[in-house]
Image: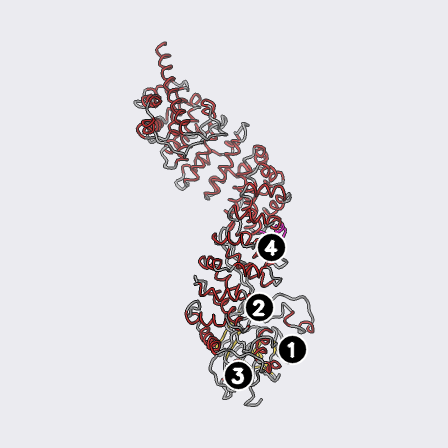
Amino acid sequence: MSRHTPIHYFVCSENLDALVINNVTKTFTVVEYFDSEEEVDLAKFAEIVKSPDCVQKRFTVYKYNEYRAVETDNKNEEDEHANPESQPGFKLRDASQMLYNHKRTSSGILVCMQPSFAINMSDYYPSMAAHCHYVPANTAASPAAARRVEPNSTHGSAMSVSFGRKMVPKRARDEEDAHAGGQQRCTYYRKSVVAISPKRSKAVESHVREDEPLLADKELQAVNMLVDLFERRATVSFYEGEPLQALSTLAYSDTYHLQLSAATAFSEISEMDTRPVTREALEPILYLLQSAHIDVQHGASAALGNLAVNVENKLLIVRMGGLEPLIRQMLSPNIDAQINSVGCITNLATAEENKMRIAKSGALLPLTRLARSRDLRVQRNAAGALLNMTHSAEHRQQLIGAGAVPVLVELLGEDDPELQYYATTALSNIAVDDSGRQLLWDTQPGLIDALVRFVDASTIKVQCQAILTLRNLASDDQYQLQIVAHGGLDSLLPLLQSEYDPLIISAAACLRNLSIHPDNEQPILHSGILPCLVDLLTQSGNEEVQCHVISALRNLVANNDADKTPFAEAGLFDHMKAVLLSPDASDNVVAEMVAALNVFVLDDSLAPYILDGGFLELLIPLTRSPQVELQYNACVTISGLAGKAGEAADRLVQVWDRPDGGLQSYLASFLAVDEGMDPVLRSIALWTVTQLLESNSPDLVNLVTSHPSIIKNIDKIASIGSLSDSELRNSAYTTDSLVGQRMSRAFDDAYGVDPENPDENDDDIYNRMINLAQDVISLVHNQDQDVWRH
């Protein structure tokens, strides 16, 4: 080799993961431009770099990480090397680019990752095209194995060198809630090659053809600045100041490769830095997004997608008109364009403000079409975007109008768990609306079978979402019956016995809705689920599980008048009492438990278990709860137990003055006229007194009538009808919190309350309260007369 012959090295290795100049253990193949080769280790490589013929001005290591090549089918060697770019698996896996300046050429070592590097170099230096070799992975770097790349002179003149990592498919971060309809970020971005242009030497310029455009001084300055900045990129902010100006210069250049360099640089920068950016930083990216060159669009859309993980950036991108060019990319037949554009819109759609603009932009139709793409990455991004558009009723209707429902149901038949998850979650959200459920019922007869199959899926999040979709569908009677008829109960029982809370929550929530239909009571009880539900009350420490389970049990008891002793025999009341006594029980769980007791006490076969189980002692303190609904249910349950006083008067006598002042303290405080008690709660107390007086228990009647304030205050309430409206309002305040609540069947029958139409105005409530008080006074007078007669 001549001392004065310029040498351009192509360094290839199966694994260049740790290319360091002083690492003498790695061996690389160095291919010289005149097609000779020699095996050298790094020590010898360093000697070449430091030789008198080589003045080292810059030596930087850039790494390419995690490029996943698509596996090719069995191809013979001849086919494999026929056209490297046509072989999707024909890529180097990992490499590093090393830059230094040669004494004669000011070029130097070029580490070739894939054909585009050699093509780019030949664009700038046509005379050197014959010396550019593409060396595939796992292939010896010999003239026979290396493919010469023909020059491509259609673009501007500059030498391509690389900085940063090669842009590769990138998995987005997962989000939590998703399972309840949570937002989805895009799954993939497809990236292109990073390329910038260093200043050429006179020796090389002598080979440039006359028709090749030269870079403007401003562009050359921007390129050289970026070369320096990327060597210390960790400490540089590229979204402002001179770095942004340099990138903008490349972006607005008429030279294709400078635009490509800017687009790719923005993509690389945004992958590591997703801070909120200004309009000035987004403007060149949005300009590049509208480039005529698809690879420039790739880099720009990848940059927008990366920046769109930040809330402020999401809003700014859409406000600046980013949707329109992204939609154009979605309509492109190019797969990479579809991946990046749909991925970006997926991220943009996580912002509530953007959803309406996306819906009105015309994006829903192409998103729906791309959800049927043959490319899994496109499908995932499109399905994620559709899911993100299902979080409000208005957007769900727009999705339905775009024909998304049959596409989402089709995705249930895909083998990919991510697609199954996105589809089930989106359908679960659509099933929130009455109109959505009706549409699914009318047009998707096979939906329930598909969802029931997913209950046994191997992916937990798919299982959870399938069950939650069934739960939402089970808001309708027709689906409640169909799910049970199609084997839904058999799939739910194993999940209730799972050790994974999300599965138990989903299954319990679904069963809660299925238990609403009276015709499902016997299938549920015969399925063997009852003991499991009762055990979950105390075995599960999860609040949601406990609330769903007790609600399901309440529904099953309320469905009909059949004998309910199997519930008591399964230990229901023992478990309920244990929860109510537990200091760890949440307010929500206690409220659900007391609401269930309110229903259970109405059943003649269950009321004795409640009376004898010591629940009165637990209920009386709850009448003073600051939670209105809990307070209401405690009072109503006590009034229901008072209705059984003829059978268990002794239990009510025992709690007359204990605990916490007992039953008499609760009644006296709720009947005190000057305390402004809610008229609904006061009516419940009046009804309780009525039940005690009608119990035929001398002890209870005596305790009530001899109390120093109870009857006296009731007499005042009974005379309220003769007071002025202002005095009436001052004696008791009104609230809407309890309007429409049901007391008991006996109360409804006695006072003509229609439980199916509970809406009442203030006058109805007050009149009923006065009537109750007057009835109590009549009872007292009648009993006094009976006593006098005897």
- Under circle 1, the secondary element is loop
Amino acid carrying label 3: it is Lys
> What separation in Å lies between label 4 and label 3 (alpha carbons)?
54 Å
Residue 145 is tagged as 1
- Under circle 4, the secondary element is loop
Amino acid carrying label 1: it is Ala
- Under circle 3, the secondary element is helix
Label 1 close to label 2 by CB (< 8 Å): no
Q: Which residue is mark 2?
A: 293
Amino acid carrying label 4: it is Ala
In the picture shown, does residue 218 fall above or below 784? below
Label 2 close to label 4 by CB (< 8 Å): no
**Image quarter in which the C terminus is found:** top left
Percent x, y of residue 245: 44, 71
> What separation in Å lies between label 1 and label 2 (alpha carbons)?
31 Å
Near mark 2 (Cα within 10 A), the count class, few <14, some 14-19 or many ≥20, is few
Percent x, y of residue 700: 37, 21
On the picture, is 333 further left or further right than 272? right
Front residue of this view, candidates 314 and 756: 314
Amino acid carrying label 2: it is His
Query: In terms of sequence position, does the residue under pointer 3 or pointer 1 come before the other?
Result: 3
**Image quarter in which the N terminus is found:** bottom right
- Under circle 2, the secondary element is loop
From which residue to which does the magenta span run? 410-421
Residue furthest top as drawn: 789
Instruction: Nearest to the eye among marks 3 and 2: give it.
Output: 2
Q: Which residue is mark 4?
A: 371
On the picture, is 20 further left or further right than 138? left
Front residue of this view, candidates 661 and 275: 275
> What separation in Å lies between label 3 and label 2 (alpha carbons)?
42 Å
> What separation in Å lies between label 2 and label 4 (alpha carbons)?
25 Å
Q: Which residue is mark 3?
A: 44
